[in-house]
Amino acid sequence: MNRLNTVFLCMALFCNDISLAQDNNYDEKYTFREGDYNGIGKWYMGREIAHVMGYQGIGWLERSEREKEENVSKLIQNLGIEPDDIIADIGAGSGYHVFRMAPLAKKGMVYAVDIQNEMLMAIESKKEATKIRNIKTVLGTEKSIQLPNNSVDKILMVDVYHEFNFPREMIKSIKNALKANGKLFLIEYRGEDPKVPIKEIHKMTEKQAVGEMEAAGFTLRENINNLPWQHCMVFIKKPTH
């Protein structure tokens, strides 16, 4: 290798080191390395983050088999929705759960939060067709759900948390928006069960989920074990002293 090539190589390595250092300074809990084909190469607390499902997957979200596969009716029952509840569906997608919760919270509000405008447009279209008024779409970001502090009674996340590019920041935002006595319902495909026909990177074990939530200041109240493929983990804020 001649001297000029050596200089260029050293400069490239130096710039790369700076970039990695900046990333680490930004959030030392994230690491970067190759992993699953369906992952983004970014890891949090030993878990690789999965690619986000795009709006092109709306058909899959609205598939006719979903009720049978996931028993969504039972999930909605698990939420124990009261008429005046303020609920946020984070990663609401096409609104599959939103339109099942809103009639139960008839005196309250359901916030449909997503980072894709196309998803929110689909919800707005269906909202207009169904004339359901207690649904409000919210454009979130990769780091914030964009809801006021202490404003929400229940937060639902269905098969979406494992796709957050910035889980640490998102859970902080979620915790801030949740009322002191609020509940966080984390629904994820069971990583412990090889029979669940979902790619491994799109599953989570209870142990992994509890570890990440505890790091964010939540504690597991219960894992309702009545869904065919998914955990239904209910978290509450840890008491502050």
Image (cartoon, rainbow, N blue to C red):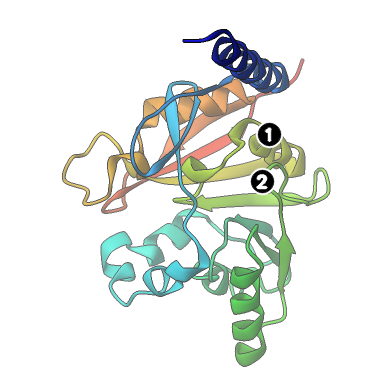
Q: Which mark is residue 169?
A: 1
- Identified at 40% across, 45% down, the residue is 188
For the question of whether residue 204 can be seen, the reply is: yes
Q: Which mark is residue 142?
A: 2
Identify the secondary structure beneath mark 2: loop
- Identified at 55% across, 36% down, the residue is 235
Furthest toward the right, the residue is 148
Q: Which residue type does callout 2 highlight?
A: Glu
Q: Residues within 10 Å of mark 2 (few under 14, many from 20)?
A: few
Residue 53 is left or right of residue 217, and the answer is left
- Identified at 71% across, 54% down, the residue is 140
| Residue 39 screen position, x and y as percent | 41, 40
Q: Earlier in the sequence, mark 2 or mark 1?
A: 2
- Identified at 53% across, 50% down, the residue is 157
- In this orientation, which residue lies closer to the viewer: 223 or 52? 52
Q: Rounded to the nearest whole Å, what is the CA distance between mark 2 and mark 1?
A: 8 Å
| Residue 33 screen position, x and y as percent | 44, 24
Whether the residues at callouts 2 and 1 have beta carbons within 8 Å, the answer is: yes
Q: Which residue type does callout 1 highlight?
A: Glu
Number of numbered labels in the structure image: 2
For the question of whether residue 224 can be seen, the reply is: no
